[in-house]
Amino acid sequence: MIPSWRGKQAKVRWWRLRPNPLRRRSYLIEAWLLIAAWTLAVLAAVGTGAWTALAVERHVDALRAERHPVSAVLVEDAVRTVGTSDGSDNYRATVRWTAADGTSRTGLAHVGSHSKAGSTTQVWLDSRGRLVPTPMTAEQARLEGVVLAAWAAVGVGGAVRGKATRRGSHPHGPGPGDGGRTGVPSWGVGVGAPP
């Protein structure tokens, strides 16, 4: 008799691995394949997550190495632009800086909310001397790496596990969508059906 709790049948765990005179050899093989699939899913998820985190870290390090800060002077007062999702506002202003070749250049940059014309600010330039956003800090890069690694791990682990568990059907009959593969004739439809 299967044990029950509050009128519901209790699930017997690891039934495929337990010694039982009614257990088929295929049940044991299926159990070991499921264990292997779960192990592969976990290993693939951890490996993909670690690889993704390292790739993000390398990318952010390359951006940091390529960009450099330059002191710039505001040409106009800071102007409020579109608000962000966290409720803070962005402020932009036209700034002027001296390029590496000595020429004066201007561009639109993010500045502090109380910045006035004539005040100095720090802007970031790439290797070509163009204005670029401030590179991520180490903490921001780490957080982005962890989030992307988690998403990659969940995706790969789920794909491996889903592929492995779909391989075999349940030993007690066809699963959902297996109706066409059961080999049972469909009476009343098709050739030879009574009128």
Image: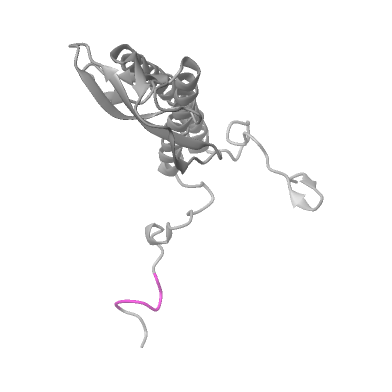
- Pick the residue in front: 34 or 56: 56
Q: Is residue 188 in the magenta section? A: yes
Q: Quadrant of residue 87?
A: top right
Q: Residue furthest right?
A: 6
Q: Which residues, given as a range, are shown in magenta? A: 186-191
Residue 187 placement: quadrant? bottom left
In the image, residue 140 sits, relative to residue 171, either above or below, namely above
Q: Position of residue 91 (x, y in %)?
A: 44, 34
- 134 relative to 5 in the view: left or right: left
The spot of residue 155 in percent (x, y) is: 43, 35
- In the rendered image, residue 84, in percent from the top left (x then y), is placed at 49, 40
Q: Which residue occupies 62% across, 36% down?
A: 15
**The one of 21 and 167 positioned closer to us in this rendering:** 167
Which residue lies at the image location 42% right of the left edge and 30% below the top edge?
152
Q: Residue at x 43, y 33 (%)?
A: 78
Quadrant into which the C terminus falls: bottom left
Q: How many marks?
A: 0
- Magenta-span inclusion, residue 138: no
Q: Can see residue 30?
A: yes
The secondary structure that most of the magenta stretch takes on is: loop
Asked if residue 32 is positioned above or below residue 1 in the image, the reply reads above
Quick check: 167 left or right of 106? right
Comparing 20 with 88, the one in front is 88
